[in-house]
Amino acid sequence: MTCLTLDDPDAIALDRTPILDGETTVGYVTSAEYGYSVGRCIAYGYLPTEYTDPGTSLEIQYENERYAATVRETPLFDPDGDRL
């Protein structure tokens, strides 16, 4: 399971939308929600290992639009556990 964030803070993604590398579908979103603590949509999906490095740029297609997305390390909020 790979975590991605959409680069545009106003963009959204839904479950089962394709994750693309150029014209190639490399996976599908399994779940997505707006992450209020990070200020953008967070999407999760299964991707081939060559696409899972943090910082990898991909696109998520929603309806007929494509939105830039970036693979991220998790957790996105409070990665050091300081707020626990």
Image (cartoon, rainbow, N blue to C red):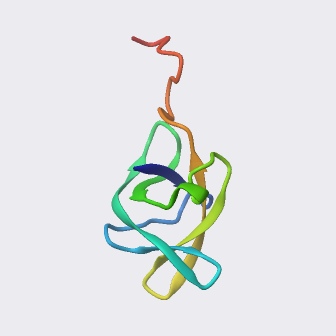
Q: Quadrant of residue 30?
A: bottom left
Residue in view at x 43 percent, y 84 percent: 63
Asked if one can make out residue 56 in the rendered structure from this viewpoint, the answer is: yes
Residue in view at x 40 percent, y 50 percent: 1
Q: Position of residue 2 (x, y in %)?
A: 46, 50
Seen in the picture, residue 48 relative to 19 is either above or below; the reply is above
Seen in the picture, residue 70 relative to 65 is either above or below; the reply is above
Residue in view at x 49 percent, y 88 percent: 64
Looking at the picture, tell me which residue is in the foreground, 11 or 28: 28
Seen in the picture, residue 84 relative to 29 is either above or below; the reply is above
Asked if one can make out residue 6 in the rendered structure from this viewpoint, the answer is: no
Which residue reaches farthest front?
49
Residue in view at x 61 percent, y 85 percent: 23
- In this rendering, position of residue 54 left or right of residue 19: right
Q: Position of residue 44 (x, y in %)?
A: 40, 54
Count of residue discs: 0
Looking at the picture, tell me which residue is in the foreground, 14 or 48: 48
Seen in the picture, residue 29 relative to 71 is either above or below; the reply is below
Q: Position of residue 29 (x, y in %)?
A: 38, 65
Q: Which corner quadrant holds the C terminus? A: top left
Looking at the picture, tell me which residue is in the foreground, 50 or 15: 50
